[in-house]
Each structure stands twice: as C-alpha cells, then as structure tokens.
C-alpha cells in the first residue's frame, strides 16, 4: 500500500497559512506534524492527525518530544 501526496503551490496551508499545501489542506511541515501527532490548531489539521492515528502513524518510534 502506498500513498501519493500531491502539492498545490498556490493553495495555502490550513494550519500555518504557508503557500504550498497538499490535497489534505496542509503544507509538508504541518502534514508531518499531524502524522507525528503534534498538537494541531485547525479543524483540517486535527482531521489529518486523527486519520494518521487510525493508520498507526502517530505511534512514537523514539524519543521525539521537544
Ligand atoms: Zn502548514
């Protein structure tokens, strides 16, 4: 199983408002944050984080906390 993420450089990130968002509505950095279960501010960010949790992507692999 593979996932392809495409980025729209004119679309703004729902989380941090940076230009260049993926189809999920988040930029690369915020998508990564969501996948690693970092706290998200936007509804879209929370939804992506929730999906990642269900897929098991948010499981801590190492001591990644700041
Ligand atoms: Zn962002």
Image (cartoon, rainbow, N blue to C red):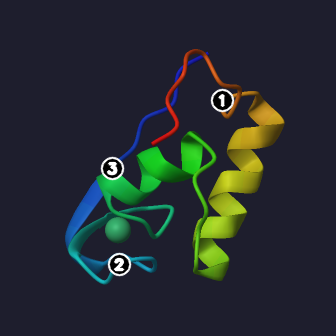
Q: Earlier in the sequence, mark 1 or mark 2?
A: 2
Q: Residue 61 location in percent, x, y? A: 60, 16
Residue density around tag 1, few if under 14, some if 14–19, many if 20 or more, within 10 Å: some
Picture quarter with the C terminus: top left
Task: Label 3: state its secondary structure.
Answer: loop
Q: Are marks 1 and 2 in contact (CB under 8 Å)?
A: no
Q: Is 28 or 2 nearer to us in this picture?
A: 28
Q: Earlier in the sequence, mark 3 or mark 1?
A: 3
Q: Residue 47 location in percent, x, y? A: 71, 65
The reply to whether the residue tagged 3 has its Cβ within 8 angstroms of ligand 1 is: no
Q: Is residue 44 above or below residue 50?
A: below
Q: Separation of disc 2 and disc 3 at Cα?
A: 18 Å
Task: Label 1: state its secondary structure.
Answer: loop
Q: Is residue 51 above or below residue 8?
A: above
Residue assigned mark 3: 6
Q: Quadrant of residue 21?
A: bottom left
Give the mark count.
3
Q: Among all residues in the image, which is located at the extreme right?
A: 54
Q: Residue 43 location in percent, x, y? A: 66, 80
The reply to whether the residue tagged 2 has its Cβ within 8 angstroms of ligand 1 is: yes
Residue 57 lies left or right of residue 53; in this view the side is left
Task: Label 2: state its secondary structure.
Answer: loop
Residue 38 lies left or right of residue 9; in this view the side is right
Foreground disc of the pair 3, 1: 1
Q: Residue at x 43, y 45 (%)?
A: 32
Q: Separation of disc 1 and disc 2 at Cα?
A: 21 Å
Residue density around tag 2, few if under 14, some if 14–19, many if 20 or more, within 10 Å: some
Foreground disc of the pair 2, 3: 2
Q: Are marks 2 and 3 in contact (CB under 8 Å)?
A: no
Q: Quadrant of residue 53?
A: top right
Q: Is 32 or 1 nearer to us in this picture?
A: 32
Residue assigned mark 1: 57
């Amino acid at each position: 199983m593979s996932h392809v993420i495409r980025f729209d450089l004119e679309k703004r990130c729902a989380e941090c408002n940076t230009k260049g968002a993926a189809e999920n509505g988040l930029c690369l950095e915020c998508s990564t944050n969501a996948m690693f279960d970092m706290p998200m501010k936007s509804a879209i960010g929370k939804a992506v984080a929730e999906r990642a949790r269900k897929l098991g992507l948010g499981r801590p692999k190492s001591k990644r906390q700041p």
